[in-house]
């Protein structure tokens, strides 16, 4: 089918939608046919997309969403807004897509489809996070609130992990610490010691990145108190070595610990953090050398 034929079909579908919205005392039609109009507009959107008119396709879907919402069909309204957001993304208009994803998530939640809402959170954040990590944080935070209401612990853990990574990318260490602590609490509840150990190392590293060995020590103790079996693990010994060598100012030994397998296998955000991590004494020495030059 040619582009002109697709555009003609789209315009015909728009006319059908307009007819659905008309009321007539003669025909005993006392209220608009919102679902019929929305369905016709969805078909028009497909035609516009196939014709390469992504902007028009997205705008038409937003109209369809409004019609569904007027008929209290919140699920299909959310689906239409999500579809519009995806079209805007294809058109390179990610900033315009964000509020539509946001409304789609709310709509799915209002319709009682929390799993669909959570999947949309993942999809939206994955699209947005490279270009705008701050907005991705907003999306994940909203998703976290949704899944916590419905006791979806695995999904909550994934959202917390993504939040931590984004906070680290933005050097927002205080927020990263809070996310890591929340994730540790969830794994303490189910006594998953290996994951607790990995997160404890992460928590110590983030504290040391802030040059706060006192907080690193306290939070390590907090993890041990919450999960006593963690104390006898290799991960606990790594935490103790990091804190001990940092506190003593032994940067050579501290760097050796940073090279161990448990740390080298961490996410890229932690690897970047570790590149600039030195004991306070070593950092002070480097600054003095720089001053002498």
Image: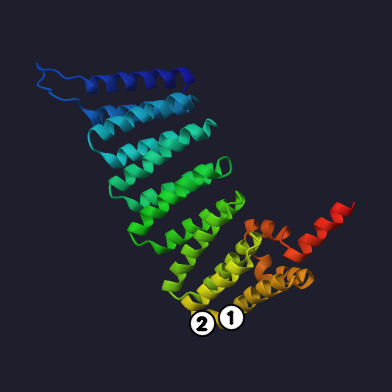
Residue picked out by circle 2: 229
In 3D space, how far apart are the residues under numbered discs 2 and 1 (Cα atoms)?
Answer: 8 Å
Task: Kindly identify the residue that appears in the image at 34 percent across and 19 percent down.
Answer: 12
Nearer to us in this view, 122 or 157: 157
Q: For the view shown, which residue lies furthest in the right direction?
A: 293
Q: Is residue 124 left or right of residue 80?
A: right
Q: Is residue 141 left or right of residue 258?
A: left
Label 1: element kind: loop
Nearer to us in this view, 134 or 221: 221
Q: Is residue 166 left or right of residue 189?
A: right
Image quadrant in which you'd find residue 272: bottom right
* Within-10-Å neighbours for mark 2: few <14, some 14–19, many 20+: few
* Within-10-Å neighbours for mark 1: few <14, some 14–19, many 20+: few
User: Residue 269 in the image: x percent, y percent?
Assistant: 63, 56
Residue picked out by circle 1: 233
Image quadrant in which you'd find residue 214: bottom right
The answer to whether residue 165 is above or below residue 73 is below
Image quadrant in which you'd find residue 14: top left
User: Residue 275 in the image: x percent, y percent?
Assistant: 73, 59
Nearer to us in this view, 168 or 116: 168
Q: Are marks 2 and 1 in contact (CB under 8 Å)?
A: yes
The answer to whether residue 194 is above or below residue 132 is below
Task: Kindly identify the residue that appears in the image at 46 percent across and 37 percent down.
Answer: 98
Label 2: element kind: helix
Task: Kindly identify the residue that appears in the image at 43 percent across and 36 percent down.
Answer: 99
The answer to whether residue 15 is above or below residue 112 is above
How are the colours assigned in the image? rainbow
User: Residue 73 in the image: x percent, y percent?
Assistant: 25, 39
Q: How many marks?
A: 2
Nearer to us in this view, 191 or 180: 180
User: Residue 78 in the image: x percent, y percent?
Assistant: 34, 40
């Amino acid at each position: 089918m040619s582009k002109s034929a697709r555009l003609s079909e789209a315009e015909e579908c728009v006319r059908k939608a307009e007819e659905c919205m008309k009321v007539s005392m003669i025909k005993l039609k006392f209220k608009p046919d919102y679902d019929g109009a929305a369905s016709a507009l969805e078909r028009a959107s497909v035609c516009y997309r196939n014709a390469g008119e992504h902007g028009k396709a997205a705008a038409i879907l937003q109209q369809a969403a409004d019609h569904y919402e007027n008929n209290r069909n919140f699920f299909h309204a959310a689906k239409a807004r999500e579809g519009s957001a995806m079209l805007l993304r294809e058109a390179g208009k990610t900033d315009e897509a964000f509020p539509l994803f946001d409304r789609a998530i709310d709509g799915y939640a209002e319709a009682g489809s929390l799993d669909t809402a959570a999947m949309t959170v993942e999809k939206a954040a994955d699209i947005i996070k490279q270009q705008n990590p701050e907005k991705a944080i907003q999306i994940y935070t909203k998703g976290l609130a949704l899944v916590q209401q419905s006791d979806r612990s695995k999904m909550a853990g994934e959202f917390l992990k993504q939040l931590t990574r984004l906070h680290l990318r933005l050097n927002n260490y205080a927020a990263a610490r809070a996310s890591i602590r929340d994730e540790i609490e969830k794994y303490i509840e189910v006594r998953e010691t290996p994951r607790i150990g990995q997160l404890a190392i992460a928590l110590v590293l983030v504290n040391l990145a802030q040059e706060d060995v006192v907080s690193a020590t306290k939070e390590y103790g907090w993890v041990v108190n919450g999960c006593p079996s963690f104390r006898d693990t290799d991960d606990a010994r790594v935490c103790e070595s990091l804190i001990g060598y940092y506190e003593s100012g032994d940067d050579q030994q501290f760097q050796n610990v940073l090279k161990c397998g448990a740390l080298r296998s961490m996410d890229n955000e932690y690897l970047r953090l570790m590149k600039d991590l030195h004991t306070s004494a070593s950092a002070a020495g480097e600054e003095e050398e720089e001053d002498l030059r």
